[in-house]
Amino acid sequence: MSRGNKIAFQIIFWLYVAGVLFLCFGHFDSTPSVPLDFFGIPTDKIVHFTMFFPFPILAFLAFDRFTDSVKSTLLFTGATFIVGLILAFGTEWGQAHFTEYRSGDPMDLLADTLALFLSSVLVIVVDIVKQRKSSA
């Protein structure tokens, strides 16, 4: 991937992180009415899953120069997963302790964690397949 693409993905990654923080801490007085659940899953949990799923993918696209072997892929993706967990925990903790209009919900953290885990597994599989194709 070219240097220009790397810079673009890094900018997109940091804009994404800023967007997650905005969505987690923003005070939205007038939001559209949405159903409380979708096929039995609470809508806000789907939103949390959707917010955190891109984190490992965007981190990989922005910083994949660190993944030239299976071991480095696992280490990088594991570190990315932990950083994502810190972001997820920090947003929930911050909502509970620094806002009066939001609450920290352990189930939101569970949805965030599930999204980060599944996305991390996807990144690992795709990168290992990419490595094997390039070495063949």
Image (cartoon, rainbow, N blue to C red):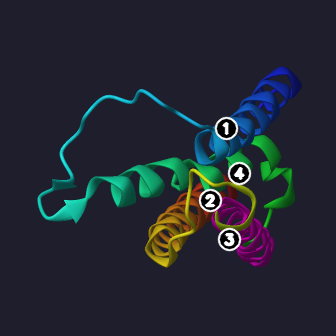
Find residue 4 and name its label: none
Give the amino acid at mark 1: Phe
| First in sequence: mark 2 vs mark 3 | 3
Mark 2 Cα-neighbour bin, 10 Å: few <14, some 14–19, many ≥20: many
For label 1, the SS is helix
Task: Determine whether label 3 and label 1 are within 8 Å by CB.
Answer: no
Give the amino acid at mark 3: Phe
| Residue drawn at point x = 64 percent, y = 56 percent | 56
| Position of residue 16 measured from the top left corner of the image (x, y, whole percent) | 67, 37
Magenta part of the chain: 71-95
Give the residue at mark 2.
127
Residue 94 magenta: yes
| Residue drawn at point x = 73 percent, y = 62 percent | 94
Give the amino acid at mark 2: Asp
Give the residue at mark 1.
22
> Real-space Cα distance between discs 3 and 4?
21 Å
For label 2, the SS is helix
| Residue drawn at point x = 78 percent, y = 24 percent | 8
| Residue drawn at point x = 84 percent, y = 21 percent | 4
> Real-space Cα distance between discs 1 and 4?
22 Å
